[in-house]
Amino acid sequence: MKQIPPDHPHNFWRQANMHCLYCTGAYDQANSSALFKIHRSWLFFPWHRAFIYFHERILGKFMGDDTFALPYWSWDTPEGMWFPDIYRKGALNETERDAIHLREPAVDDFDYVDHDLASDVQIADNLAFMYHQMISGAKKTELFMGCKLRSGVEGWCDGPGTIEAAPHNTLHSWVGNRYNPERENMGAFYSAARDEVFYAHHSNIDRMWTVWKKLHGNKPEFVDQEWLESEFTFYDENVRLRRIKVRDVLNIDKLRYQYEDIDMPWLAARPKPSVDPKIARNILKKRDGEGVLRMPGETDRSRVYEHGSWTLDKTITVRVDRPRINRTRQEKEEEEEILVVYGIDTKRSRFVKFDVFINAVEETVLSPKSREFAGTFVNLHHVSRTKSHEDGGEGSKMKSHLKLGISELLEDLEADEDDSIWVTLVPRGGTGVNTTVDGVRIDYMK
Ligand code: C2O
């Protein structure tokens, strides 16, 4: 694929540029001036499935092997938590990667920005992280799949699902070369698919979708025409331009592939509170009213806070009211309690990461291994054609949000009866200096 002429659609760099095309705002949506984008919404899983599907078919054609299947990088399992060896060899090798992370033994850091942990600690962290992103934090479809991006300027949303935020984004960044401005290749969307490991990374992302779907009884994700009818175009293995819809990729049997069942120890890696909840509660009670950064402009504990925005150049702790307490088991199953961090403005499209913790006290281990961890926001660098606000573009006032499912976590923290919780936002690796957040609130999701 690397040797055939650059104007041939099967040329490797042209393949890589397909990803670039769809992610940098090269296209407008049909019948609209709004930018087309495939990240940070419910289009993330289906688009990438279609992309690697055709890529796989093309590879199979070159090999003369109709049964060829792309390998998946099983980073969710302890054995798979190292950079896969096969991608260090021959045509699969790539120079634009982080040499330090690829030096043995380096366990993939799902929480990547500024960590340096021993392998066994990192593996335990990763498993707890997977549990959170796949199970407790992903009880509702939108939490897993991402926000409902609708057509047109009004339909714009920016809210990735759990797995997309991390480990998807964090591993992109972890693999990319730290000496390149945006950690190219893997660290930036425009260049990511130039690294062959991209396809194995996305096979595993795709696998995670099938695993999550199975955990939820293989029910349809969204019964929504706008999603089902969203369509993309790709060249197939016979160099015919194909139109493919989201509805065409939902059943992998029809795409003629399957994932083997392998051991997934993260299924049982439910995190534990790092501080005994009773002790934490006593400390938190004393905290009331003293020395705590409150929401700017907050005068009483009314539910609608009017304030400016916070800059994430430092850790921020706020108390947030819970509109409903003592919900029954059934109510909780029907509606997941959601912590919404809203109005996130990353200003420039840089790598930004911050983590969210609930009821954390001084002694709390601020890591995804602890139950206090509610989720993470990760923005990967993406260059984009800039459009004005009216056009639905970037550089506009269109901000992101982060929705985190917290019902199970509140039970484990014994905070389910409290009428408020403490929320701590922890910017990582100094990446939050230009990022602002408008606020935090509790919501419910069906
Ligand atoms: Cu389109 Cu892993 O990114």
Image (cartoon, grey):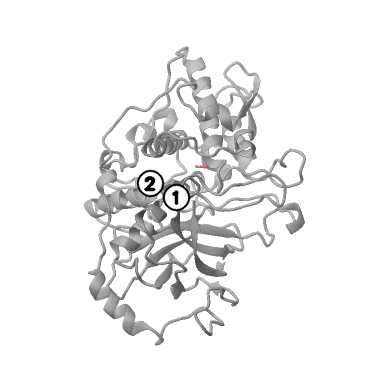
Q: Nearer the viewer, residue 304 or 241?
A: 304
Q: Which residue is mark 2?
A: 134
Contact, CB < 8 Å: mark 2 with mark 1?
yes
- Name the spot of residue 356 as percent of width and height, x first: 42, 64
- Please name the amino acid that badge 2 sits on: Met
Residue type highlighted by circle 1: Thr
Left or right: 124 in relation to 241:
left
Q: Position of residue 387 (x, y in %)?
A: 73, 53
Badge 2 density bin: few <14, some 14–19, many ≥20, Cα 10 Å: many
Residue at x 48%, y 27% (from the top left corner): 251
| Image position of 269 (left or right of 308) | left
| Residue furthest top as drawn | 64
In the picture shown, does residue 187 fall above or below 205?
below
34 lies left or right of 124:
right
Q: Is residue 414 visible?
A: yes
Position above or below: 9 against 26: above
Local SS, label 2: helix
What is the x, y in percent for residue 342? 55, 64
Tell me: is circle 1 under 8 Å from ligand 1. no
Label 2 CB-ligand 1 distance < 8 A: no
Mark 2 or mark 1: name the one nearer the start of the chain. Answer: 2
Instruction: Examine the rendered structure and indicate whether residue 210 appears above or below residue 24.
Output: above
- The residue tagged 1 is 162
Answer whether residue 432 is visible to the viewer in this image: no
Which label sits on residue 72? none
Rate crowding at label 1 as few (under 14), some (14 to 19) or many (20 or more) other CA atoms within 10 Å.
Answer: many
Q: Position of residue 286 (x, y in %)?
A: 32, 84
Q: Nearer the viewer, residue 316 or 18?
A: 316
Q: Quadrant of the N terminus?
A: top right
Q: Secondary structure at mark 1?
A: helix
* Residue occupying the point 64% across, 32% down: 231
Mark 2 vs mark 1, CA separation in Å = 7 Å
